[in-house]
Image (spheres, rainbow, N blue to C red):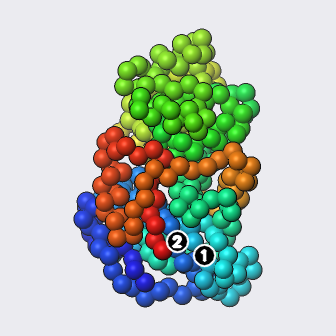
Amino acid sequence: MKAMVLKSFGGPESFQLCDLPKPVPHAGQVLVRVHATSINPLDFQVRRGDYADLVPLPAITGHDVSGVVEEVGPGVTSFSPGDEVWYTPQIFDGPGSYAEYHVAAESIVGKKPAALSHLEAASLTLVGGTAWEALIVRASLRVGESILVHGGAGGVGHVAIQLAKATGAQVFTTAREPNFEFARSVGADVVIDYQQEDYVDAILRETSGRGVDVVFDTIGGDTLSRSPDALAQLGRVVSIVDIAQPQNLIQAWGKNASYHFVFTRQNRGKLDELSSLVERGQLRPHVGAVYSLAEIPLAHARLESPNNGVQGKIAIAVS
């Protein structure tokens, strides 16, 4: 099989397209012909060596799969050859999705929503699972509440907006002016141009000084440290970004705020919940650009570039 292999930590040139043996499923596993994967910030963080202690080289990386079951191992009862499936491979535990075939535990695999193409499905598994865990499991976002989603035009952000709307929340988001229409199209009620206006000032103005119930941080840094300023009393902050340096959260103490830091876990339950939203027409990932397996280095370089012009996700057509 063809696979994009990470030979060393560094820039996009660290990848090499290789021919490798097709994996074999063992007990409780399925062998999937990968039709599509996608690119996430986690992917370039792994590539540049942010998690070097957890990723032995050489490695096949990648964190999204949409494809078709080709073979099942002993004991597998949920799937048969020919089934269309989607999932996020176990993070930091074995080969990833940048290959024509992938083996996964039956327990983390879900039936792909029929309403989505493989490119769309592969653009939703990791970001959808992350947003679900952040907003539904950790923040317990409820109908009638309000939420600020930082980076609403991004891969996680545009999915989080749709999840929040499906929950019945009022959604505020930050974006650059060229992405306003896109953010509104996926459900944002109020879009704030963070380049032209301080988002805290905008939130306090739009909420008559109350603040929002939940802040979803997809950016980190100053965005995380200033989020309490935009919170209502008893508000919640959920972040999916590593903390690179100590944060002064004294404002959070004054708001009786709670903080949740999310590194998503793999399970079929979240995929089934996302699938239900897709089938009801309440959730659809947006594919902003498509590359081939051989073009993964180009896709990485584009995602890392500031203001890269991509709305939603970069998907990879594998086969």
Question: Residue 131: x percent and y percent?
Answer: 58, 46
The N terminus lies in which quarter of the figure?
bottom left
Nearer to us in this view, 48 or 113: 113
Determine which quarter of the picture holds residue 31.
Answer: bottom right
**Residue placed under numbered mark 1 in the picture:** 68
Q: What element carries label 2?
A: strand
Disc 1: CA contacts within 10 A as few (<14), some (14-19) or many (>=20): many
Q: Is mark 1 on a helix, strand or loop?
A: strand
Q: How far apart are marks 1 and 2 (CA)?
A: 7 Å
Q: Residue at x 41, y 28 (%)?
A: 177
Labels 1 & 2 near each other (Cβ < 8 A): yes
Q: In this view, does 2 lie to the left or right of 276?
A: left
Disc 2: CA contacts within 10 A as few (<14), some (14-19) or many (>=20): many
Q: Disc number at residue 35? A: 2
**Where 84 falls versus 169 (above or below)?**
below
**Where 193 falls versus 85 (above or below)?**
above
Q: Which residue is drawn at 56% across and 32% down?
A: 184
Question: Residue 189: x percent and y percent?
Answer: 60, 27
Q: In this view, does 78 lie to the left or right of 262?
A: right
**Where 150 falls versus 295 (above or below)?**
above
Q: In this view, does 84 lie to the left or right of 98?
A: right
**Where 151 falls versus 94 (above or below)?**
above
Say which amino acid is labelled 1: Val
Say which amino acid is labelled 2: His
Q: Which of marks 1 and 2 is nearer the N terminus?
A: 2
Q: Which residue is drawn at 57% across and 36% down?
A: 185
Determine which quarter of the picture holds residue 193.
Answer: top left
Question: Residue 80: x percent and y percent?
Answer: 70, 81
Question: Residue 110: x percent and y percent?
Answer: 67, 66
Q: Residue at x 72, y 33 (%)?
A: 168
Residue 192 visible at all: yes
Nearer to us in this view, 234 or 100: 100
